Amino acid sequence: MTKHLFAKALLATTLLAGPALAAPIEMKMTVPSVPSDVHTKALHVFKDKLDAAMPGVFDVQIYDSGSLFGQGADLDALQRGNAEMTYVSYQLIADALPQYGLLTAGYLFQSPEHYRAFLDSDIGAEFKQTVSDEMDITLLDACYLGTRQLNLRKKMDVNTPDDLKGVKLRMPSSDAWLFLGQALGANPTPLPFGEVYLGLQTGTIDAQDNPLPTVEAAKFYEVTEQITLTSHLVDAINFAVSNTFWNELDDAQKGAVTDAAKAACDWNNAERVKIESDLVSFFKDKGLAVTTPDVDAFRAHVQEAYKNSPRAKDWPDGWMEKINQLAE
């Protein structure tokens, strides 16, 4: 009798307790950027949006400053299933899939919206599928990184690539960067970033190129007189998730993660565009001339240089023209 009563009590307790709650889905996000970086802050926007859409479903853990995996090791971590999300550059994708070196070319993309138009297009779908198949990651959205501009030691008229003939333009030392400098019409000069300020100050170089926030942070405006808004490289990095993680989600969860990634990139893009816009006024106040050249002339010249170079031999046929059309 006692055993019977105990069994009934245990059954009643089980029924009252209901089914056990599923543990939250762990989502480790690893990035090399520091907490103050816009890209790091965008991860918190992602987390907040995802938690609001699906309370208690995901356990989003943000590891910034390379505290979980260092730069260069984060992609490997996704592919091994040791982390679930990171940012992946187009340059890194091109290293693994050379045909997509096209996506790192000067003057290909013209704005953050242009990147999205590409990813949402038929060729963008093909690109994302190939990346998924070959690199075992899924790309969710592209977050704007910045637009590279010319920063000149002395004031000069710059309207077309011909005007940069003989200009010693500092570029990073890789072949891809030096090619871009040459395609712009300049004399590309490799120099470590830490030596650029002194190089501008002494005349070792005549110009350097970087996004405007870098010009401000490195105080290059102290040793230069002009910024020319060539906008020769509009760069972005991709919100990427491990396929090991992605394939375990149901459709609703995938939709919520994708929407949160887009919200994070929306926030990131607006912040970066505002920062760059505000810096134009900042540099003018510092006494620099800020000029805008014939960007169409630069774009035509640079794209022709790429198309006629050996680096274009692996590029998908017709993609440059199709991507150009997506900006119209």
Image (spheres, grey):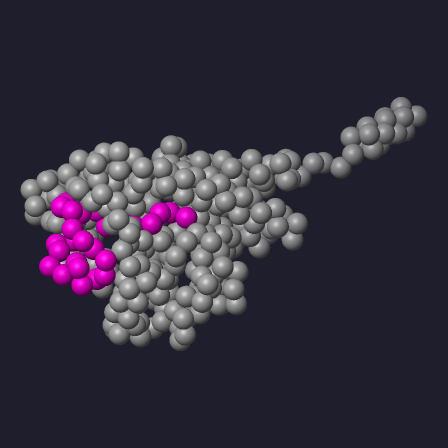
- Give the camera-side residue of 29 and 106: 106
- Residue depicted at 83% across the width and 33% down the height: 15
- Residue depicted at 44% across the width and 44% down the height: 269
155 inside magenta stretch: yes
Q: Is residue 88 visible?
A: no
Quarter of the image that includes the N terminus: top right
Instruction: Give the percent coordinates (x, y) of residue 8.
Output: 88, 29
Q: Farthest residue toward the top?
A: 2
35 inside magenta stretch: no
Instruction: Give the percent coordinates (x, y) of residue 279.
Output: 32, 38
Q: Report the side of 162 relative to 281 (left or right).
A: left
- Give the camera-side residue of 123 and 276: 276
188 above or below 146? Answer: below
Instruction: Give the percent coordinates (x, y) of residue 300.
Output: 30, 67
- Residue depicted at 36% across the width and 71% down the height: 315
Range of residues picked out in magenta: 144-169
Q: Is residue 275 visible?
A: yes
- Residue depicted at 43% across the width and 52% down the height: 112
Q: Farthest residue toward the right?
A: 1
Q: Report the side of 41 relative to 11 (left or right).
A: left
Quadrant assignment, res 295: bottom left
Instruction: Give the percent coordinates (x, y) of residue 307.
Output: 30, 72
Q: Report the side of 197 relative to 253 (left or right).
A: left
So how many labels did they put on this image? 0
